[in-house]
Image: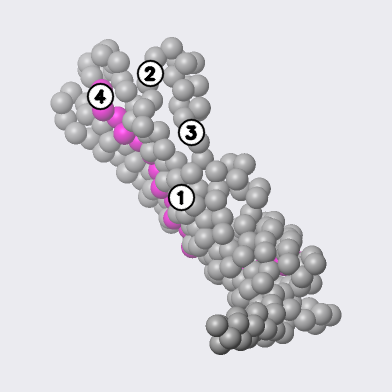
Amino acid sequence: MRRIYITLFAIMIAISAFSQENIIKTSPLGLTYGRYNIQYERLITDYTSASVSASYIRPNLFGLEDAINDLLLIDILEGTSLNGATLHFDYRIYSRNQTGSRGFYIAPYLRYATIGFKTNVVIPDVQLTTEEEQSLSDIKTGFSINRFGYGLKFGAQWIIKDVFSIDWNFAGVGADLYNIKTFDYYYSNGEYNENIFTDNSWRWSFATNFTIGYAF
C-alpha cells in the first residue's frame, strides 16, 4: 500500500511539473451550424507547440427538406444529406514575453477538408414535352468538394487560472486547391443518363477561429 501511495505521489508531481504542456480545445461557435470539433495542442519547447484539429460537419437539413416539400405542396425531395470532415495541422511560434502556450503566435498550417451533398428528386408521373415527349424518374443529384491547403495564421492564446484556455485565431491567409464535382443521375424514357462535371483550381482563402479548452 505504501508503494502505491508513493507511486501516486510521484505521478502527481510529474503532472504538475509538466502542467500546461497539453491543451484540449473545441470550437463552440461551430455547434450552431453542426460542426463538431476537437483540437489537441502539445508544447514542444518553451515557445513553440504543435497542434492537430479534427472536425465532423453534419448540419440538420431535415427542416430544409420539409420546407421545400411544403412550399411545392408535394414530397419532391427525399434522402437529403450534407456532411463532411476537416483535418488541420499547425506549428505555433509564440512570443517570448512569457513561456508556454500563451500570448501572441504565428503558425504555418496544413489542412484538408471534404464535404458532400446529395438528394433524391421524386418526379411525379407527368410527361415533359420538349422536341419530343420525355418521362423523367429517379433523379439523384448533388456535389462533393475536396480541399487541400496551406497558409499562415496569426492569433493569441490566454491561459486563465493555469487551467482554462481561450484561443483566438484572428487572421489567417492561405492557398487552397479545390476539387469540385457535381453530378446528376436519372432515367429518361427508360434509359440511364449521367451528367458529371469536375473542376480543379487554386483559390486564396481567409479565415478566423475561436476555441475554448482545458490545459493540463
Magenta segment, which residues? Answer: 136-156
**Which disc, if any, is residue 137?**
4
The residue pinned by badge 2 equals 75
Distance between mark 3 and mark 1 Cα atoms: 14 Å
**Which disc, if any, is residue 84?**
1
The image shows residue 188, relative to residue 198, as above or below, that is above
Q: Residues within 10 Å of mark 3 (few under 14, many from 20)?
A: few
The residue pinned by badge 3 equals 61
Distance between mark 3 and mark 2 Cα atoms: 15 Å
**Amino acid type of the residue that numbered disc 4 sits on in the rendered structure:** Ser
Distance between mark 3 and mark 4 Cα atoms: 23 Å
**Amino acid type of the residue that numbered disc 2 sits on in the rendered structure:** Asp
**Amino acid type of the residue that numbered disc 1 sits on in the rendered structure:** Gly
Q: Residue 47, position in %: x, y?
A: 72, 82
Of the numbered discs 3 and 4, the one sitting upstream in the chain is 3
- Magenta: main secondary structure equals strand
In front of the other: 175 or 160? 160
